[in-house]
Amino acid sequence: MLSVIRVHLPSEIPIVGCELTPYVLLRRPDKTPTTDDVPESAPLEGHFLKYRWYRVQSDKKVAICSVHPSEPATLQCLGCLKSKVPVAKSYHCSTKCFSDAWQHHRVLHERAATAATEGNDEEELLRLNSSGSGSGVLSTSGSLTNGSSSVYPAAITQKTGAGGETLVEVGRSKTYTPMADDIGHVLKFECVVVNAETKQNVGLSCTILTSRVIPAPSPSPRRLIPVSGADVIGHLDSNGRPLSMGSFTVLSYNILSDTYASSDIYNYCPTWALTWTYRRQNLLREIVKYRADIVCLQEVQNDHFEEFFSPELDKHGYQGLFKRKTNEVFVGNTNTIDGCATFFRRDRFSHVKKYEVEFNKAAQSLTDAIIPVSQKKTALNRLVKDNVALIVVLEAKFGSQAADNPGKRQLLCVANTHVNVPHELKDVKLWQVHTLLKGLEKIAASADIPMLVCGDFNTVPASAPHTLLAMGKVDPLHPDLMVDPLGILRPHTKLTHQLPLVSAYSSFARMGGSVIAEQQRRRMDPASNEPLFTNCTRDFIGTLDYIFYTADTLAVESLLELLDEESLRKDTALPSPEWSSDHIALLAEFRCMPRARR
């Protein structure tokens, strides 16, 4: 007979909006184990599985610490309430917790504050539980959204008889997505074998209790900062998107593939915050919130594009294109190979053409042309890294500002790449960037078209690849050129391109003398005019991601503000519960310009 062997949850902490799918191990009638579901619609030898989810409601409401979500709150920051900071961010589990988080917490106040001054720091704390045990009750009514109403009839709400607890049925399927009403409550999952004919339970039910449900951690919103002197609020529609006929926004974001999100590498991040079920929802919320017209993502797994990002972003009006990395080096399930995904809003752009760059093929052609037969294997072992680039040509559905050509199509070329090459292989990294730029030059020669080059280049400012992108050439004496065992970079005079590329974020360095401008400049490297960091882990802090544009056809209107170290929690790095990648997103608003007459 069908029986349940074991039940457990993959995540230790349930989070609002993140799907919970228990692992249920069954024993078939033939004694073989399986994890396949056995629903009522497809019983197995006259038996099926019945699932129930319950919210365990106590007579006491419990707030959750905003820093340590597994701990109940004992303190609430009054400054948050005065500044209208989201109430969930105002709770702390101890005075030490509040003190340690103050540098980050103060930023919340500064961003949410109005012209009125904030209260005295000595008045910032309101003790909810003087004993500090974490079992106190909130005195402020309505500060939690733990409603007692159920989506199921009240008849199936049952008292447990223990400590005034009540079980409220909230789900009847194997999976359940916690809601706001569940915050602060424990969930109970129940699984039992049922006789398909009699509908009676067979044997005992298997149950499991979760920890208390926590709200989805949300980082402070990043503002769009105008850099052209225009008032950005003046040209946003009611949904927060640019209204100007000739402007559009582009997002570039390495989202950290689940394959690489190992707790061994990111041991400072809570394990529940590293799970893909949590990170995918957090990433989706962040991406959708930016409302970008074009979205360039890196490290998107093949299965995640097909099963999650493509269908989910389709609901928000996006069409997506994907280029998976090649798998000559990769060993494992090909479905989990990552690649580059480019999405665009269907109401703003239409797809014209797609080009795919496979650097492995370019490596094969290069070795055939210049490497002696006896050295080919060694050369390919160095050059073949499975990296790709996705180049998409789009046609704008908004009007071109070229008044002298009102009927001319407004095309745009968007390149999206991830140059994932070990740091010591400086020659390979530069060769891949140069190869991409030469391909883009061919497209530019065949069409009068603005260009964007986005991605994670895994190269820091002032390195040879960055210099080539930004300056169009590399000084023959650049130290990176010393690493070239195959001679693929010689002669050095060939390391050039004719595209007038400029880094979008360098525009912050050219802003006026406003307070906001000065704040952003403090987050820039004055030597390179690039952000101080776009990648922040315990082992590395620096800039690896860029958005380049052709300055003769596009102008930067505004940029997504940069993060600083105070924007990240003290004693942590990325990824974190708030930010689900080890990279930060870059976003720029551009305006199309008519090309100067020659």
Image: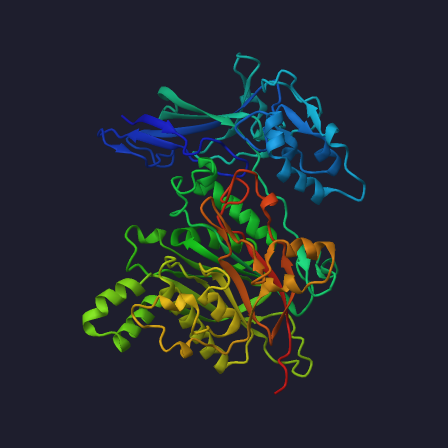
Q: Nearer the viewer, residue 79 or 187?
A: 79
| Colour theme | rainbow
Q: Nearer the viewer, residue 249 or 543?
A: 543
Q: Is residue 555 above or below residue 162?
A: below
What's the residue at 42%, 75% (across, down)?
495
Percent of width and height locating residue 364: 28, 71
The quadrant in which residue 531 appears is: bottom right
Q: Nearer the viewer, residue 468 or 574?
A: 468
Quadrant holding the N terminus: top left
Q: Is residue 224 above or below residue 349?
A: above
What's the residue at 33%, 26% (across, down)?
4
Quadrant holding the C terminus: bottom right
Percent of width and height locating residue 523: 61, 53
In the picture as drawn, the residue positioned furthest to the left comes out as 374
Query: How many badges with numbers are in the image?
Result: 0
Percent of width and height locating residue 267: 43, 38
Percent of width and height locating residue 442: 45, 79
Q: Nearer the viewer, residue 562 or 170?
A: 562
Q: Is residue 420 above or below residue 203?
A: below
Asked if one can make out residue 358 in the rendered structure from this viewpoint, the answer is no
Left or right: where 148 falls relative to 321: right
Left or right: where 322 falls relative to 530: left
In the picture as drawn, the residue positioned furthest to the bottom comes out as 598
Asked if one can make out residue 312 in the rendered structure from this viewpoint, the answer is yes
